[in-house]
Image: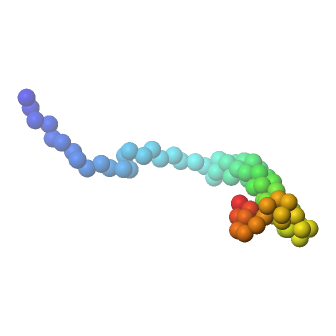
Amino acid sequence: MASKEKNDSINLEDAVPTFDYTDDEVKKVIRKIDWHVMPLCLTLYTFSVLDRSNLGNAKLAGMQEDIDLTGDRYEWLGTM
């Protein structure tokens, strides 16, 4: 049998395909991400603020014992 030369080195530039996008295509993708991801982030942030303010209002209203906010639980709920 003829011996084959073994190539142990791997060229990553050949292994990873490259894509050429036009500036117009990049702008369209960014605009699409902005219109889909940003409203979701805004909604989640709004709910987060509302939840933290409700937690603070519950503590100030004296509901600590009713909802079992003793010890570090208040800080944990605010962090979550």
Nearer the observer, 23 or 67:
67
Corner quadrant of residue 62: bottom right
Q: In the rendered image, is residue 53 in sight?
A: no
- Direction from residue 56 to residue 20 in the image, left or right: left
Q: Residue furthest top?
A: 1
Corner quadrant of residue 5: top left
Name the residue located 72 percent from the left edge and 69 percent from the top edge: 71
Percent coordinates x, y for residue 73 in the rendering? 73, 64
Name the residue located 25 percent from the left edge and 50 percent from the top edge: 9
**On screen, 19 above or below 63?**
above
Nearer the observer, 49 or 27:
49
Percent coordinates x, y for residue 50 in the rendering? 85, 60
Name the residue located 23 percent from the left edge and 47 percent from the top edge: 8
Q: In the rendered image, is residue 65 in sight?
A: yes
Q: Residue furthest left?
A: 1
How many circles with numbers are drawn on the protein?
0
Percent coordinates x, y for residue 49 in the rendering? 82, 63
Percent coordinates x, y for residue 59 in the rendering? 85, 68
Q: Quadrant of the N terminus?
A: top left
- Direction from residue 50 to residue 41 in the image, left or right: left
Nearer the observer, 50 or 64:
64
- Direction from residue 39 to residue 10 in the image, left or right: left
Q: Quadrant of the C terminus?
A: bottom right
- Colouring: rainbow
Name the residue located 38 percent from the left edge and 50 percent from the top edge: 13
